[in-house]
Amino acid sequence: MLRDKVRTTTTLSINEIYPTIQGEGFLAGSPCLMVRFQGCNLRCPWCDQPTALVFKNPNTELSTLLEEIRSYPHKHIVLTGGEPLAQPNLHLLVYELVQEDYFVQIETNGTLWNENLKAVEDHIHITCSPKEVANWYVHPSVLRNAKELKFVVDESFSSHVLKRSEFLPFLEKGLVVLQPEGNKEKFLQKALKIQTDLLKEGYTLRVIPQLHKLIGLK
Ligand code: SF4
């Protein structure tokens, strides 16, 4: 009964929900349902989700959101944004999804954390994409839980960032993805050069353009 009450009294701010394939990072190619939250605490110069940046009042009841999610056959749910961890009630959605055996991926810029996720942190796949506009700051709990780090390679990106002490363990374990900004050729070449240079130093990292855009999906 309490759970029913939580479902009908909890609201979240949703930008859009749509089925697609995961186009970024280690899980690229997986069919997934994107749940995009409204509002982000950062402003990256090349952000490709401009309509999701401004914070707005919650517009969707948790029970309604769960019903919509269940209406799709997808078992891989991507919580993205905007910045999903800026949603104070995100953990209540994650609890429900984990309980229903969904594979839950959270795509975050890494600057925020929700302590209530501790109870389910072993059941979520966190993809952290540290951002230069945040001086590469990543919350320690995100670092502790992230399954991969994804860096957007743009004009100013340098491989020195990957050697920062907090990111080095990911580099050493092969858990770093370089994503050329906007799938632009010059940034693809830059990412490939970083990959080659680091390979000579004993590090293997992946270069993955935005697959969904390459194949014409949203
Ligand atoms: S963190 Fe993500 S959603 Fe926020 S401004 Fe940067 S790219 Fe856009």
Image: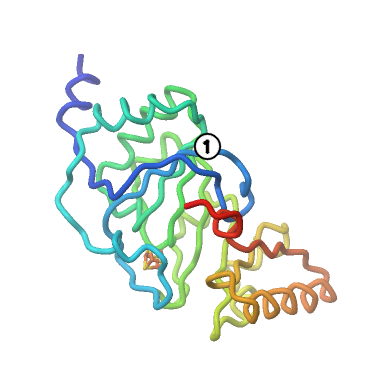
Nearest the viewer among 47 and 216 is 216
* Quarter where residue 195 is shown: bottom right
Regarding mark 1 in the picture, which secondary structure is present there?
A: helix
Within 8 Å of ligand 1, the CB of disc 1?
Answer: no
Is the N terminus in the top left, top right, bottom left or bottom right quadrant? top left
**Is residue 96 positioned above or below 2 on the image?**
below
* Residue occupying the point 60% across, 41% down: 30
* Residue 147 x %, y %: 59, 50
Please, is residue 9 above or below residue 35 in the view? Answer: above
Give the residue at x 55% y 55%.
Answer: 216
Q: Position of residue 191 (x, y in %)?
A: 68, 75
Residue shown at the point (24%, 29%) measured from the top left: 64
The furthest residue to the front: 216
Which colour assignment does the render follow?
A: rainbow
Quadrant of the picture in which ligand 1 is shown? bottom left
Residue 85 locus on image (x, y percent): 34, 52
Q: Is residue 73 above or below residue 214?
A: above
Q: Is residue 20 left or right of residue 56?
A: right
Q: Position of residue 156 (x, y in %)?
A: 54, 85
Residue under pointer 1: 122
Q: Nearer the viewer, residue 68 or 111?
A: 68
- Tag count: 1
Q: Residues within 10 Å of mark 1 (few under 14, many from 20)?
A: few
Q: Give amino acid for label 1.
A: Asp
Residue at 43% from the left image edge and 62% from the top image edge: 109
Residue 215 vs residue 133, the one in the foreground = 215
| Residue at the farthest top position | 1
